[in-house]
Amino acid sequence: MRAASRRHEWYAGASDVGLVRPGNEDAFLMEPPLFAVADGLGGHRAGEVASTVAVETLFAHAPKHADAKGLARAVRAANAAVIEAAEQGRGREGMGTTLTAAMVEGTRIALAHVGDSRAYLLARGELVQLTQDHSLVGDMVRSGTLSAEAARVHPNRSVITRALGSDPNMVADAFEVEASPGDRLLLCTDGLTGMVEDAAIAEVLRTAPSPKAAVARLIAAANDAGGHDNITVVVVDIGADRSREDRTSAATRGNPSADAREPGRSPRRVWLARLAWALALAAAVGGAVLAARGYARSQAYLAVVDGRVAVYRGVPGEFAGAQLHWLEQVTDVPVAGLDPVTAARLARGIRVDGVAAAFDLVAAYRSQTARESNPSAEPTTAP
Ligand code: MG
């Protein structure tokens, strides 16, 4: 376990043993822009070894920027390290861990995820679960044979179908999300989500005045509900990075128009200084827009147009008032046929590396909708 050694108000995290377990096998990491939670499995303290090795290896291999592919590579390195640790007699054979990792850069969030820990985004007041549980009950919820509420109390709810520490070829889910300033990211282990309903989690995230307060309230809620498992929670306020704000205010102090308040300067000099500042700013913004346009042309993302998956070249949103995206194609894949997490992510735009990758993803969605519209491919009732 890693204690929260640094306190910045835009993020906070904590881990609590709960009220039943003899020890804490969860671990978490807060090294901005990187955040992660891990839930170790194996018992007899082996789970603690697995989760700690996982977050430490993740940190050592993390990319410099919010890049989902780079983050997925770091998770693969963490998987190899957990397997190697067991082989070398640290922990024990069969130990494993979940790992849910996020890199936050401005409003961009890159995620990589394995297991049944979760990432949520409180987006404009609405709670969206960003990750899919790799668990038996998660699969049943997705296939429609079990409700989310029944899954929370199902006897096999702790059976996970993917974890670090067993399969050297394990693949992490990895994707990027464009959030908005004021959104709140939550990473947590199942000690929270197994005890507290989503509606109550959303209410805490909506009303807590700071990430630190949100973390304390979420852990208290899980313990009030029985605290059956270790509880680990990390909360990050999007667009509230202090180090970024400090850089911005330093730049503002250099603004020549601030000289207007200085005594002894003639109004004409002040006016000229303002004009020079405005021209310099216009040139900088113009240059930046051109540079951004060049970058945007190499990028692509998926979004929703008329209920169908659409491929855009470029990046979502605006930059300095300019739109940097161009509609490539509205595909024949209906959003209604996709799982709710993918649909929610599509509504916000799913960024990918280029148009070819976008069409690859569309092909995967098309086979998903084909599977789900073919009733013989899925059991109609629970066994
Ligand atoms: Mg757990």
Image (cartoon, grey):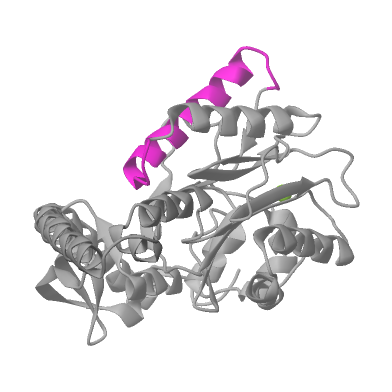
Residue for point 33% across, 78% down = 337
Q: Quadrant of residue 227?
A: bottom right
Q: Is residue 256 left or right of residue 108?
A: left
Residue for point 68% across, 77% down = 203
Which residues lie in the magenta part? 64-92
- Whether residue 330 is situated above or below residue 219 in the rendered picture: below
Front-most of 358 and 150? 358
Front-most of 72 and 125? 125
Magenta stretch prevailing secondary structure: helix
- Whether residue 256 is situated above or below residue 383 in the rendered picture: above
Q: Is residue 194 visible?
A: no
Quarter of the image with the C terminus in it:
bottom right
Front-most of 353 and 159? 353
| Residue 142 in the image, given as x and y percentages of width and height | 49, 69
| Residue 219 in the image, given as x and y percentages of width and height | 78, 58
Residue 66: in magenta span? yes
Q: Is residue 376 left or right of residue 236?
A: left
Residue 340: in magenta span? no
Q: Quadrant of residue 36?
A: top right
